[in-house]
Image (tube, rainbow, N blue to C red):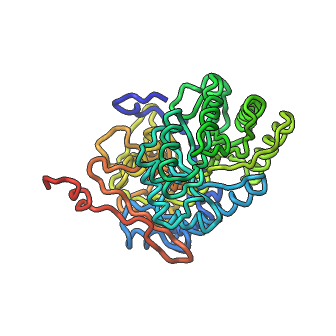
Amino acid sequence: MRAHPAGPLHADVVADHASVARPTSADELNRLSPAVWPTGAHRNADGALEIGGVDVRDAVTAYGSPLFLFDEDDLRSRARRYRTAYVDAGARLVYYAAKAFLSTTVARWVTEEGLGIDVASGGELAVALRAGVPGDRLLMHGNNKSMAEIEAAVAAGVGRIVIDSYEDIVRIADAAGRAGVVQPVLVRVTLGVEAHTHEFIATAHEDQKFGLSVASGAAEEAVRRIAKLPSLDLMGLHSHIGSQIFDAAGFQVAAARVVTVAQRIWDQQGIEIEELNLGGGMGIAYLESDDPLDVPDMALQIGDIVGKECGAAGIPMPALAFEPGRAIVGPAAVTVYEVGTVKPVDLDRGAVRAYVSVDGGMSDNIRTALYDAEYTVTLASRASSADPVLCRVVGKHCESGDIVVRDAWLPADISPGDLLAVAATGAYCRSMASNYNYLPRPAVVSARAGELAVVLRRETIDDLLQLDPGA
């Protein structure tokens, strides 16, 4: 998608063409789909949304709005489920992809549930280490790792560093040599496969910044160079084909290609690929109509695919590794906003859309503006018997593209002071948050058995002014 620099066009979706079907009743409007909302989310006797046994009204009273609210039990259960499913399918280790969302608290949760952590910067590495995650349970990515980041990873005893370029080989070997250690590494290969949701394309996707090309022979050349360096230990290959993947078709093509590479490396260089990391990208439901594969089904399909390809190639089955992030943390959180203004706008053919402005926006969720992402939203502070009206939930930023939910049906009596909750915002929203228009970033709070705990405190204007030497 190429966005216009002035932002998206408006009035482009009217009532009879809304991307989300109009609810047929107030009961349907108030219903919470278990496919989208955290496990156990429900409306209490007052009609207010409860997450982890906590009324969202109480959470906002205690910690303000906007607010990221995590269901701790939901997140932990998803981490356990991924670990069990993928270990049963042949995984040596399942890493949590920290880029989705990271704090010391979340790092401890996923580690306690048996996962490793995949970090992509020195900052993410520092958070994981501060949380007490053992170095050998960490994996480091990055297409442009600085020497300082590499040295920190080597010093921490990071279990795998993923090589993304020839420069990486030289830098990591140098850092490991100076430290007197042998550093385990993986080579990230670019397979010409890209997968998103229900679609995958198996050609012409090597024009990207990540990995070393299989088609050009760069990946195999990287293996040759690594084999000559005593401070590096090649553990295997890494492949990542996309995100929000709803089926195993893309993995099937990727597995066939990466196994072919492993076979050539064995035949030509006598080097056995002991580990195959197939990355992450497993999808979640943002809308009730989304239909990602069940976790164990996806795991078994992928494991079966790799096993069959290795059998056909006549090479040993490598240990597998995976890096789910969004699939663990995304559905476990909601964002709670307070409504500020409601502005009905007349559209063509007599249709009306209500612009519902909230106290956050693209500074806490940039995904709608970046990717035209779709979300599920509900009135969270009460239930309503009013008829549904077509709404667009927008933020408070000075930007026409500041849209949280492009098409939503909300009760006709939506009013200033109401609370809205947007589902499945645990992944990337807080991680990609900004201070645009000098809005402090929201607090992140967890709920469990009716109790709240701070994961990240809310920023203040004083926090922002401390960065300004002239203030």
Q: Nearer the viewer, residue 220 or 182?
A: 182
Left or right of 412: which side holds 36? right
Q: Nearer the viewer, residue 33 or 433?
A: 433
The image shows residue 131 at horizontal and vertical percentages of 49, 66
User: Is residue 430 visible to the viewer in this orientation of the structure?
Assistant: no
Instruction: Examine the image and state in which quarter residue 302 appears.
Output: top right
The image shows residue 314 at horizontal and vertical percentages of 86, 36
Q: Nearer the viewer, residue 116 or 364?
A: 116
User: Is residue 2 visible to the viewer in this orientation of the structure?
Assistant: yes
Q: Residue at x 45, y 67 (%)?
A: 455
Q: Residue at x 80, y 40 (%)?
A: 305
Q: Residue at x 67, y 37 (%)?
A: 198
The image shows residue 386 at horizontal and vertical percentages of 50, 57
Looking at the rendering, in which quadrant would you find the C terminus? bottom left
Left or right of 262: which side holds 59? left
The tally of labels here is 0
Left or right of 449: which side holds 86? right
Q: Residue furthest left?
A: 470
Left or right of 248: which side holds 410? left
The image shows residue 101 at horizontal and vertical percentages of 49, 55
Instruction: Examine the image and state in which quarter residue 440 appears.
Output: bottom left
